[in-house]
Amino acid sequence: MSLCWLHFPSYDLARKGLAGSFLNITTPEIIDSLQRAAVKESRLGIPILFGLDVIHGYSTIFSIPLAHASTWDPDLVKTCAAVAGKEAASQGIRWTFSPMVGIARDPRWGRIAEGAGEDPYLGSKMAWAYVEGYQGAKLLPSSNLVACAEHYVAYGGAEGGRDYNTAEVSRRTLWEIYLPSFKAAVEVGVGTVMSAFDDLDGVPASANKYTITGILKDDWNFTGFVVSDWDAIGELMNHGIASDSAEAAEKAVKAGVDMDMVGPYHGTLAKLAESGKVPIDIVNDAVKRILRIKFELGLFDHPYVDILKSRESLMLPEYRKVALEEERQAIVLLRNEGGVLPFSKQVESIAVIGPLTDSKPDMLGRWYCLGQADSVVTLLDGIRLMLPKATILVAKGCGITDTSTAGFADAIDAAARADIVVSAVGESGNMTGEAESRASLKMPGVQDRLVRKIVKLGKPTVEVLMNGRPLSIQWDADHVPAILET
C-alpha cells in the first residue's frame, strides 16, 4: 500500500514493513531515516518508494504542462523533465505522478492545465518526452524518477468539463482519442500508471477490468504497476459498486489496480485472499509488479539519500537557464497588428496595468511543488529590467475576480500618460487544476471591461494573458493590437 505522510507520521509503519511507499515528504533527512528504518529494521528489508507530484518542476519551476505543449518541442520538454527529475531524486524522491497524458475535450475542465490539450498526436509526443526525461531511455538505477502516466482513462472526457464527472465514450473515440497518449507512454517504458476517479460508460475507471487488465496489461504488455488516484478505491463505494472497503479493494485489485494510493483498502487483501474472494495469484502479481519497479529503479542497492549532495542540487544556474529557454518557447504570439511588438529600446514610457502585473504567487501556476514565490521574476520586474531608462507607470485597475471598477480611473490615467500600454490579465494560479472546473470561459471579474476602457484610448496596447485554460476573448482578438498567451 501507499501512505501519505500527513496521515501516517509514524516510523513504526516503516519498521514493520507496512508501507510500500510514502507520499508528499520533501525533507531529505526524514526520507533517509524512514528508508533506513524500512531497510534495516523491517522483517523483509524492502525499501520504500517515495513519491510526489513533480508536475512542472521540483525547485526550479517551469511552465505548466499546457504551456509545455505550446513549445511543440518534445526534446525541450524532455530536458525540463530531466531537470525536475534530477532535483527531486537528489532529495530522495524517486516517483512522480506525472505526466498527465489525458486528452482534454472541454476547456472548462480545470485539469486541462496539466496536460497537452485536445490533440492525441501532440499528447503522445509529450507523453514520450516526459517519460524519457524522468526515466531515461529505459528504467534503470541511474534513472532519476519513475514516471506515472495519469489518469487512466478518458478522465478528460468528463461531461460538461466537470471534474470527477462521468464520461460517455464510444469504443472508437476511446481508441482514437484517449488511449494513444497512454500507449505512447507504455511504449517508451513508463513504470507506473494511475487509474482515474471517473466512471467510463458506467464502470468506474479504478474498477474497469477491460481497460486496466484487458488493454493495458494484456494487449499492451505493460509490466509496471497501476496505482489508484487519491482515494479512488474508497470512492468505489460512492459510485455504488461496493458496499464497504473490503469489497472496494476486491473490485479494484481484480480489475488490475496493484497499489492503493491512500492505504487502508488494500490492507484487506490478506483476508480476501484467505477467504478465496481474491485469488492469491492476483495478489502475487501486484506484489511482483511493485517489487520489479523498485528493483529496476535500484532501490535495493542504493536506497539512501546523499544528504550532503541534496543541499547542493537545487536551482542550479544551468537549470534556471533551461527554464528561461522553455518559458521563451512556450509563449505564443496570438496577434500583433501594426507591429506593436517588439518594443523599441528607446520607448520613453510604459503603463503596466492589470491584476497579474506583479503577482509572484500566481505566476508559479498550480502544482508548483517546492517553487518559491520570492524567486519569480514578474512581468513588471522584467519590463523594468529590460527597459531601465523608461518611465514605468503601474496601476492594477482591479483584482482578478473583482466586481468593482473603483480602480479603473487610476489605470486609465496611467495608460493615458504612457506611450505604450501592457495589460496583464487572466486567471489566478489556483483557478486551474484538480476540482477547479469553471462554468464559463469568460475573463474572470471585470478584467474584460478594464481592457476595453484601455483600448479605447487608442494607445499601442499589448494584452499579456496568464491562464491555465483557453479563455473566451473574442472582443480582444478583434480590437487589442497585440496579444501574448503566456
Image (cartoon, grey):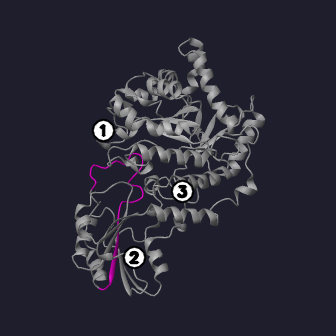
Mark 1 or 3: the one toward you: 3
Magenta: main secondary structure equals loop
Observer-nearest of 270 and 296: 296
Query: Image check: 435 left or right of 323?
Result: left
Q: Is residue 62 positioned above or below 106 on the image?
A: below
Task: Give the SS element for disc 1.
Answer: helix
The residue carrying mark 2 is 342
The residue carrying mark 3 is 76
The answer to whether the residues at label 1 and label 3 have Cβ atoms under 8 Å apart is no
Q: Position of residue 321 (x, y in %)?
A: 58, 66
Q: Is residue 22 positioned above or below 54 on the image?
A: above
**Residue type for callout 2:** Pro
Most distant residue in the right direction: 40
> Which residue corresponds to the image point at 32% horizontal and 48% vertical from the top-left?
108
> Which residue corresponds to the image point at 69% horizontal and 31% vertical from the top-left?
17
Classify 10 Å Cα crowding around label 2: few (below 14), some (14-19), many (20 and above).
Answer: few
Residue 11, quarter of the rendered image: top right
Q: Is residue 189 magenta?
A: no
The residue carrying mark 1 is 159
Q: CA distance from mark 3 to mark 2?
A: 24 Å
**Residue type for callout 1:** Glu
In the rendered view of the protein, which quadrant contains the C terminus? bottom left
The answer to whether the residues at label 2 and label 1 have Cβ atoms under 8 Å apart is no
Classify 10 Å Cα crowding around label 3: few (below 14), some (14-19), many (20 and above).
Answer: many
Q: CA distance from mark 1 to mark 3?
A: 33 Å
> Which stretch is magenta?
417-441
Q: CA distance from mark 2 to mark 1?
A: 42 Å
Q: Position of residue 232 (x, y in %)?
A: 46, 33
